[in-house]
Image (cartoon, coloured by chain):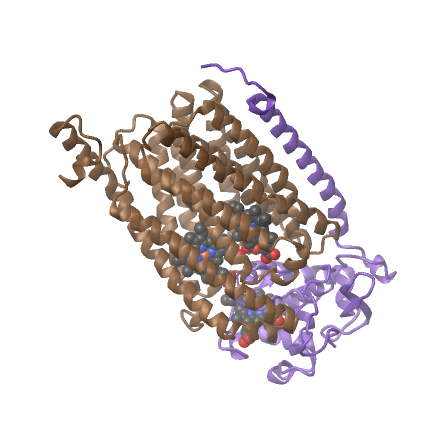
Amino acid sequence: MLSKYSEVKWESQKLAINYFRVAIILFLANLLFGLLAAIQYLYPNFLFEIIDFSINRTLHINALVVWLLYAMIGAVYWMLPEETGIETVGIGLGKLLFYILTAAIAVVVLVFLLIQVGAGDIKSIWLINEGREYLEAPRWADIGIVVVVLGFLANVFLTAFKGRRTGILTVLMFDLLALAGLYLAGMFFTKNISMDQFWWWWVIHLWVEATWEVYVAAVVGWGLIKTLGANRKIVEMWIWIELAMLFGSGILGLGHHYFWIGTPEYWWEIGALFSALEPVPLIGMFVHVIYDWGKQAGKQHEINNKPAFAWFVVNTFGNFLGAGVWGFMHTLPQINIYTHGTQWTPAHGHLAFYGAYAAILIGMMYIVVQGKYGIRQMRFTAAGKWGISLLTIGLIGMTMALTIAGYQQSMIERAEFGSTWAGYFAAQNSHWMLQAMGWRLAMGVVTMLGFVFLFKDLLTIGPKLKAEEAAGSTANANAPAGAAATA
Amino acid sequence: MEERPTSVWGSTRFWRKSAGWVTGVSALLLIWLSADTVPQISMRSAEDLDAGKPMRVPPPTVINHKITYEFDARRGHEIPIIGEKEAFFGRNDYSEEEANALLTHGKLTVQAKNCMSCHTLLGNGGYYAPDLTKAWLDPAWSDQGPYMAMTGTTSREEAMAKFLMKPSTYPTHARRMPELGITEDEAKAVVAFLKHMASIDTNGFPRNFAKINGGVNAK
Ligand code: HEM
Ligand code: HEM
Ligand SMILES: [Fe+2]
């Protein structure tokens, strides 16, 4: 994916490749800082007062959010010319914004690492660290992000209006608009911590459980047409159904974060009811993919990009399991009073983010590689198989470890001790917790290994399959693609 | 190719319209509910506090008062009780402006040092360190707990401020809190922030606080 070779004709797709390149590097940062944080759970003196847990965690989750956003923007720039049939309007501006955003992010990372914390005044919020989980980027960077995203949106809207505006694009346009608008809800200071968290959740929840999910529904739909040759009319109808279900449950499902932050009791009922419905569209998305797969298999239609499709399957199943099942487990207030803010939450957070977002965007990376090298038939390489297996095993393993940790933390710290400082450490120092943290680290290493294979595969699969196809077509024009692999 | 749908269930138009309606109605409901919630979670006035009105988020002047967390039979869980006047760093007469400035400084410090990346506040944040929602009431800071003696202080707020300025020199566990360059002024302000947070009505979170050591009504 890093090489210069390219059969891509559209400038928009060249820009998309750049977005994916940065995304994969930030994915590496995401994992690296996660590992450092996980080590500190077991060896608290590791990097103590050098790069503290708080710094590692901030870099871990911010790298995550930014790599997902980069890949999301990249995927749209990739799809745009294919959907509209024309070059993206304002592509020059798009490229400029890409470099500005990337430079800004590099500066923010350096400030997090080297300056780390500021004095307790508004200057620190503007220049160093906003100190609000996931939205730690200082205010100047927030404004930069808003400007860049507005430019991106302008490009998408102008291109869609000028070219062919398909159903998939229509969904994406309005969804991206909402996604960008929500970011503004996180950009103000208040001394009132309840008010702070009330609006903070508008950004976080309405991103991951509403607008990002709809984005995924649209991209999976597009991917099914692309890899399986699924019927566009049916796919687009499904996307509208999914959108109705996702927004219908996800928007008011926001209430499941308003149980204990100072907000009134009526959110117990509203949050419980609507968030309990959130898994329904996730089952729907899973069924959709499996159904289309079965239908096309019946028609003897070959999947033209096996790794991408495999990642789509990991996506729909992981989304259902991580967000749907693991989310549902702690979404009722009777349970959440004991699990809120324990290791239950990251157990769910890891599998949900991986299943719902990382997987689909890795799938898109394979589609990009296919397009970049003009490969007719993408098969799985050994590295690709190791990558998808180890990453998935690693994430599921971490989730299991954190679930056990969360269970005993709810029992010991929350139920038995009543959440004091002493109770917190009684839970942290129990054998169950220590073992779980050991397994989390081990599974984190497995995850990292999976990443190494994935990275290698993304770099090499293109040239490799391209050469095979070229050799195959000169040696035997009728040989099925992939048969040349053994030659 | 153009197939006529045999029923509305197979019609893209129908689903597109439904999606629009569902989204619109949900968004409007959320906005309506938020319009009800936001005033309820806004900080109340110092007058309301003095008049003893029930409130979810008290004003900054709550730092002039004793705060406890007690079981409420009607609601079925604990709620913060704002009691008689109590000295905070030797005074119980912080004016609205003073208390306001203190709380603002405290909240800014909490953000600039990113406490939330290790601790949870109101249950949200990192899971590496204890939840701070009711940290003000934690038995470890009381005269029965170890910290007044460790820091050579005689009050909860002084012990907390001393600790926050040099946390890694007062450890109680292998997992220590690092030094974050917190000044004396910042430390006092952060303690005011923590005291205020303990007075927020969180619908009984955390449940049965300090059930084992110190009792539900931490003194
Ligand atoms: C792809 C979709 C989803 C993602 C990526 C996701 C991710 C997350 C993350 C990262 C958190 C922790 C936030 C924090 O740092 O404080 C969280 C919290 C939570 N999520 Fe999800 N989630 C998803 C879907 C769902 C669904 C469908 C449900 C319910 C059915 C759910 C229920 C919850 C609940 C109840 C919490 C609060 C946990 C607590 O009280 O500490 N999530 N989610
Ligand atoms: C090498 C693998 C990884 C390791 C060792 C790791 C470790 C960690 C650690 C130690 C935390 C802090 C939890 C705490 O506050 O106690 C964390 C948080 C988090 N990580 Fe990872 N992580 C890894 C990979 C990932 C991946 C691949 C994703 C997303 C796809 C991810 C998403 C998150 C999220 C969303 C949070 C915040 C969770 C919350 O607040 O509930 N991590 N991770
Ligand atoms: Fe949520």
Q: From the image, which quarter does the C terminus of chain B lie in?
A: bottom right
> Which corner quadrant of the image does residue A448 belong to?
bottom left
Residue under the image location 77 percent in, 60 percent down: B96
Residue B217 in view of the camera? yes
In the orientation shown, which residue stands out farthest toward the right?
B51
Q: Is residue B90 above or below residue B22?
A: below
Please name whichever residue, A58 or B186, is drawn nearer the observer in this view of the structure: A58
Residue under the image location 16 percent in, 41 percent down: A486
Relative to A238, A450 lies left or right = left
Relative to A85, A410 lies left or right = right
Percent of width and height locating residue B194: 67, 66
Please name whichever residue, A257 or A331, is drawn nearer the observer in this view of the structure: A331
In the orientation shown, which residue stands out farthest toward the front?
A298
Percent of width and height locating residue A411: 60, 69
How many tags in the picture? 0
Instruction: Indicate the chain coloured purple by its letter.
Output: B
Q: From the image, which quarter does the N terminus of chain B lie in?
A: top left
Residue under the image location 56 percent in, 31 percent down: A241
Q: Is residue A114 above or below residue A176?
A: below
Percent of width and height locating residue A110: 41, 54
Q: Is residue A42 above or below residue A30?
A: below
Q: Is residue A302 above or below residue B36?
A: above
Instruction: Indicate the chain coloured brown by its letter.
Output: A
Residue under the image location 66 percent in, 42 percent down: A252
Percent of width and height locating residue B138: 67, 73
Residue A187 in view of the camera? no
> Which corner quadrant of the image does residue B143 belong to?
bottom right
Please name whichever residue, A332 or B131, is drawn nearer the observer in this view of the structure: A332
Please name whichever residue, B185 or A245, is drawn nearer the observer in this view of the structure: A245
Relative to A331, A155 lies left or right = left
Relative to A410, A457 lies left or right = left
